[in-house]
Image: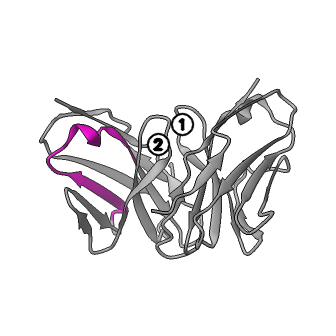
Amino acid sequence: RKEVEQDPGPFNVPEGATVAFNCTYSNSASQSFFWYRQDCRKEPKLLMSVYSSGNEDGRFTAQLNRASQYISLLIRDSKLSDSATYLCGTSGGYQKVTFGTGTKLQVIP
Amino acid sequence: EPEVTQTPSHQVTQMGQEVILRCVPISNHLYFYWYRQILGQKVEFLVSFYNNEISEKSEIFDDQFSVERPDGSNFTLKIRSTKLEDSAMYFCASSLRGSGVNEQFFGPGTRLTVL
């Protein structure tokens, strides 16, 4: 089983739609969780860290379910500029972040 | 907003040659990392560095690779004898913390092409 698994997509959604991505992780010792955004051939940019209580940043909401070992990202009112690949990452309390392959989102006008 | 910078943006080299990729982490960060991403694949951890020594490395980071912090600002990745399969995007990252919520910030990357 892969350490971090994501549906590669693509998710094609119309502008204004709500879209959700899930990510599962296999290492039960994982302590930190992240969502990054990566545009084509660019660096990953930190979107948000994911806390046990869940957290929200504008149109973005992240949730963590430790019992089922998954994290989710919800994007409300999708914009064209949200089109990107969304990477899920986990860290076992040490330094490296393990990434999934990413989920591609295409927002359509 | 402070950011991680990397040079060069693109490096083309012949197989067997040595390359050095350079990074300037965010100035108050203490932990430094190298990751790589082969085209179409996921971002993979190579090595982490703290207090002037390697703190963790992956299986990819074999004897052909080395890292150094030659001065107070630069962080370098050296590949001694490049192979075709080293062609990838190499990202440097830095973080303030090394554990807990260790948010890592990535540089724009160096695209390495080995011919």
Side of B46 relative to B53 (left or right): left
Q: Which mark is residue B93?
A: none
Task: Specify the quadrant that holds the C terminus of chain B.
Answer: top right
Who's the residue at 86% across and 34% down the image? B17
Q: Would you place residue A17 above or below residue A35 in this image?
A: above
Side of B14 relative to A60 (left or right): right
Mark 1 is surrounded, within 10 Å at the Cα level, by few (under 14), some (14 to 19) or many (20 or more) other residues, namely few
Instruction: Look at mark 1 in the image and give the residue it sits on.
Output: B41
x and y, in percent, of residue A53 in the image: 27, 75
Amino acid type for the residue under numbered disc 2:
Thr
Who's the residue at 47% across and 49% down the image? A44
Q: Would you place residue A21 above or below residue B31 in this image?
A: above
Q: Numbered disc 1: what chain? A: B
Amino acid type for the residue under numbered disc 1:
Gln
Most distant residue in the front direction: B1
**How far is mark 2 from mark 1, CA to CA?**
7 Å
x and y, in percent, of residue A84 in the image: 35, 39
x and y, in percent, of residue B114 in the image: 75, 28
State whether residue A100 appears in this view: yes
Task: Specify the quadrant that holds the N terminus of chain B.
Answer: bottom left
Instruction: Look at mark 2 in the image and give the residue it sits on.
Output: A101
Side of A101 relative to B49 (left or right): left
Q: Secondary structure at mark 1?
A: loop
Who's the residue at 65% across and 58% down the image? B24
Is residue B27 or residue B79 the one in the foreground? B27
Give the extent of the magenta segment.
A68-86
Who's the residue at 31% across and 66% down the image? A65
x and y, in percent, of residue B5 in the image: 59, 53
